[in-house]
Amino acid sequence: MKAVVYHDAGDIRLEDVPEPKIQDPNDAIVRIIGSAICGTDLHMVRGTMPGMEPGTILDHEAVGIVEELGSNVCNFAVGDRVVVASTIACGCCSYCRAGYFSQCDNANPNGPQAGTSFFGGPRMGGPVNGLQAELARIPFASVGVVKIPDSVSDEQALMLSGIFPTGYFGADLARIHPGQHSAGSHEKRTDDGELPHRPAAEDSDRMAGVDEDCLPRGGQARADHHAGATHRFRD
Ligand SMILES: [Zn+2]
Ligand SMILES: [Zn+2]
């Protein structure tokens, strides 16, 4: 199958690789029909994420069709259209039961202290091959895969894989409410474990796509003076 494969910083190739196989009864194989490029992927391109193993398939945001199911995965059927969550979680440990899926004790093959396991990441995150491929193996699929209703398009569902929840979580942390205006810094991303630039988000008077370097550290930013692009944040 074709996949987008990391070889080195700046050396990302589309190439033929072996198809993934079920390795565990909790796995599923998903035939990817749409995937996204995340800001996190740019770390691999630029070499700013340490520990990447050559040969790792990149990306962690995708929608697809269930191709094959492990014997423990009973909440889906082959042929279901699904969205894949960007991080991997078992659904059973104390953190997962409390809703802290990114802190899962069981998903990371490097152990419970190793941190979040996610698709297409470095050695310390698995490594687990990513989703920019024709097929992907999804560990703990009964937790990390969600069936897409017919009324939701592939493109809409793809946003829920990582991009929209990241923005929503950042807005929630920054206490942004509908009708308010705020600034967003594209570099400070919650899916990297970093918080958005909170003072800037609270003090500015437009939702703006701004470069992090434009925002003063420590607040009182007025993003409308720096904005490269502006977007209303309504819903
Ligand atoms: Zn992402
Ligand atoms: Zn867990």
Image: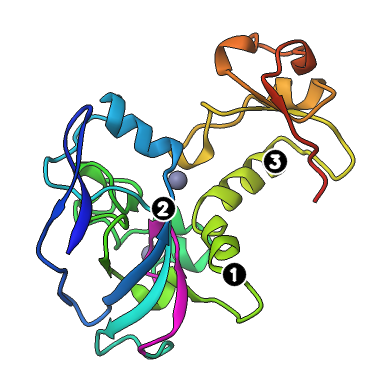
- Gap in Å between the C-alphas at discs 1 and 3? 24 Å
Q: Are marks 2 and 3 in contact (CB under 8 Å)?
A: no
Query: Which residue does the image show at 42% across and 87% down from the upper left?
Result: 76
Query: Which residue does the image show at 52% across and 34% down from the upper left?
Result: 189
Q: Quadrant of the N terminus?
A: bottom left
Query: Which residue does the image show at 71% across and 12% down from the upper left?
Result: 226
Q: Is mark 2 within 8 Å of ligand 2?
A: yes
Q: Is residue 217 visible in this depiction of the protein?
A: no
Q: Are marks 1 and 3 in contact (CB under 8 Å)?
A: no
Q: Position of residue 125 (x, y in %)?
A: 26, 47
Q: Position of residue 140 (x, y in %)?
A: 33, 72
Q: Nearer the viewer, mark 2 or mark 3?
A: 3
Q: Residue 109, relative to residue 142: is it above or below?
A: above
Q: Residue 20, relative to residue 65: is it above or below?
A: above
- Gap in Å between the C-alphas at discs 2 and 1? 30 Å
Residue 108 sits in quarter = bottom left
Which element carries disc 3, helix, strand or loop?
A: helix
Mark 3 = which residue?
A: 171
Tell me which label, 2 or 3, sits earlier in the chain: 2
Answer with left or right where residue 134 lies relative to residue 174: left
Q: Nearer the viewer, mark 2 or mark 1?
A: 1
Which element carries disc 2, helix, strand or loop?
A: helix
Residues 72 and 62: in front is: 62
Q: Position of residue 200 (x, y in %)?
A: 72, 20
Q: Position of residue 179 (x, y in %)?
A: 90, 41
Type of residue at label 1?
Answer: Ser
Label disc, if present, on residue 153 of the rendered structure: 1
The stretch in magenta equals 78-92
Answer with left or right where residue 150 lies relative to residue 224: left
Label 2: how many Cα within 10 Å (few below 14, some 14–19, many 20+): many
Mark 2 = which residue?
A: 103
Tell me which label, 2 or 1, sits earlier in the chain: 2
